[in-house]
Amino acid sequence: MPIYRLCEEIIFPPPELASANGVLAVGGDLSAQRLVEAYRNGIFPWYSEGEPIIWWSPDPRYVLFPDELRVSRSMRQVMRRGIFEISFDRDFRAVMEACRTNRRREQGTWITDDMLEAYTGLNELGLAHSVEAWRDGALAGGLYGVSLGGCFFGESMFAAVSNASKAALIALVERLSARGFALIDCQVYTAHLESLGARGIPRSEFMRLLSDALTMPTLRGSWDGLL
């Protein structure tokens, strides 16, 4: 399969033309318009510092359906006891910075300076959102992603305190489920997400579900006090 090079025009090749490992295209930019167009077409950027922007659409696609959320007995106790204070969009940039620091410590990161600025910009436009888990007034964990229609596209999560990222995700899924969201895009497999009920589905099925989800109005703006 060829790898497509993007030009100034904001357009992507069909996702089914991606290579076997999910790479679809390179180049372009991280403008809000291009990012939104990418997500609407089941595509996301993922690259390291010093590389061109690489656009992906993997097959299978890893997703979490809200009604398949799996919460262990111990996590139900954590949530019931209110160990963490959960907030939304209270400090988006801090969550991204923490995700970047955590990833860099483990294996390097795709959250480059340009990615940080691009997604912070999407947050200011009310299209990217963070979930924070606080303990004793300090940021203990969280996640961030993009929301369009009835789909939340998860990007990254971190935990500085055990169970904090799980608490943030559980709170998010429960609130999105109440709002009628159809699915949460997890992009690729991780054991952490699998333990919470995420699973792989064919890209063709993901694209069909995404198309349906995008018929819902986008819950745009700050989610602080809204979810």
Image: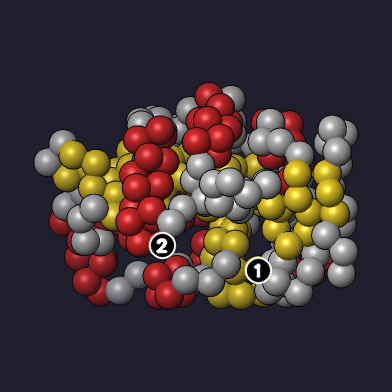
Q: Which mark is residue 61?
A: 1
Q: Is residue 96 visible?
A: yes
Most extreme residue toward the front is 50
Q: Disc 2 designates what residue?
A: 107
Q: Which mark is residue 177?
A: none
Q: Nearer the viewer, mark 2 or mark 1?
A: 2
Amino acid of disc 2: Gln
Q: Is residue 221 visible?
A: no
Instruction: In the rendered view, tell whether residue 126 sits above or below residue 215.
Output: above
**Quadrant of image for the N terminus:** bottom right
- The numbered mark, 2 or 1, whose residue comes first in the sequence reads 1
Amino acid of disc 1: Arg
| Figure quadrant of residue 184 | bottom right
Residue neighbourhood size for the residue with mark 1, other residues' Cα within 10 Å, grouped as few (<14), some (14–19), many (≥20): many
| Figure quadrant of residue 127 | top right
x and y percent of residue 49 in the render? 54, 46
Residue in view at x 58 percent, y 46 percent: 50
Residue in view at x 21 percent, y 61 percent: 162
x and y percent of residue 180 in the render? 58, 50
* Labels in figure, total: 2
Residue in view at x 35 percent, y 70 percent: 71
x and y percent of residue 130 in the render? 43, 40
Q: What colour scheme does the image use?
A: secondary structure
